[in-house]
Amino acid sequence: MEFILKKKLKFYTKEFLKFFNITIIALGFIIAIILIKYKPMYKVSISGEEIGYVENKQALEETLKEEITENTDKTVEDVSLKDEPEYELKLVSRAENTEEKKLVDELEEEMTITYKYYEIAVQETVVEKVDTSEEAEELVNEIKKESNSDEIDLSIAEKYTQNEEEVNTSELEVAKLNIQETVENAIEEIEQQKEEQERWNALPSINGIKLAVTPIEGRITSRYGVSSRIRKSTHTGLDISAITGTDIKVVADGTVISASYNGSYGNLVKIDHGNGVETWYAHTSKMYVKKGDTVKAGDVIAAVGSTGNSTGPHLHLEIRVNGEHVDPQDYLYKE
């Protein structure tokens, strides 16, 4: 009995293996026939709309970037699609024309392109744009060496944009000429500022107030501290003769605290310069300012005249510090 069971088991096992092998061979034939007639491809859709087929997803995205790079002279940093494409693996007839170029063209309309460029600034003002960091560094190093100035700030900034019109980069020679010209102008401006600072430092000052301007040009007719038959006390200012109507300029920035007729002073303009310093301009024929006006050094505030207690057209200039008059010639009209 046991022998008969073993014999039957052996028979059925052999039959099963024979059937299995036949099935495998049949499936192989079926798959081979399918692969001969069809090929596996990815259906590509954007927002649910089918736009074509592609064999390789990664190759498609690389082709997109290559296509953009080849068709622009700008540096392309990144290419991405506004809506991510959906890929679905399908069997497609080998006779089917996939038209990958057409697919790329359609996807280009959905692309966001990021461009990269480099700005070169002189004294923090952007002067030029170039395509690569190597170009930017080469230009900056050359110009620094040629200018031989440690006071010029030349900087490079890496920039990104999705607006191609912003990437208006220049040829190297053009960029170099523009940067050189800007550097030369900056050096000249620095020298002018130094000269201006030196001139400012050399100006006379009183209580920290710089007396930047001489009110008028003319001949000194009466000095500070002298006695005269027309005065009850010694002279409190400096008299400078000039033609009636000559412009009188304020010596420093300040605020008009008075502009009115004042007895023996005649038409008198008083300016407060801060730090307790005031300047007075007397005997004027006209006053061009009023109380409360703000003035800058060199502004015309009045005209020479002979109003009040005066023997002829002149400017009586007084300088007062904390209410006390001082000799103007210690600061202005030095001989």
Image: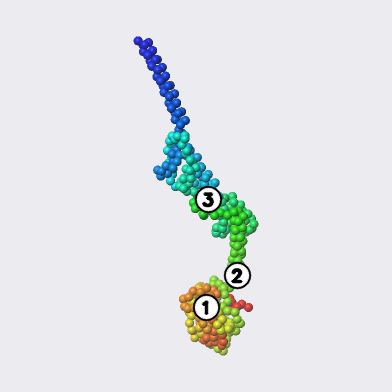
The residue indicated by pointer 1 is 301
- Compared across the picture, whether 302 is left or right of 86 comes to right
In the picture of the structure, the residue carrying the numbered disc 2 is 199
Check disc 1 and give the amino acid type: Ile
Taking the image as shown, residue 218 lies to the left or right of residue 275, namely right
Foreground pick, 113 / 282: 113
Q: SS of the residue at dot 3?
A: strand
Determine the CA span between mark 1 and mark 3: 57 Å
Q: Where does residue 98 sit, x and y in percent of width and height?
A: 47, 39
Residue for point 58% across, 83% down = 242
Give the structural element (helix, strand or loop) at label 2: helix
Of circles 1 and 3, which is in front?
3
Image mark for residue 116: 3
Q: Which residue is drawn at 56% across and 89% down?
A: 229
Q: Where is residue 57 in the image (x, y as percent from the top left)?
A: 47, 39
For marks 1 and 3 on the same chain, the one whose residue lies earlier in the sequence: 3
User: What amino acid is at disc 3?
Assistant: Lys
| Residue 117 place in picture, x, y as percent | 54, 52
Say if mark 2 contacts mark 1, CB within 8 Å. no
In this rendering, is residue 127 above or below 59? below
From mark 2 to mark 1, how far is it between C-alphas?
Answer: 24 Å
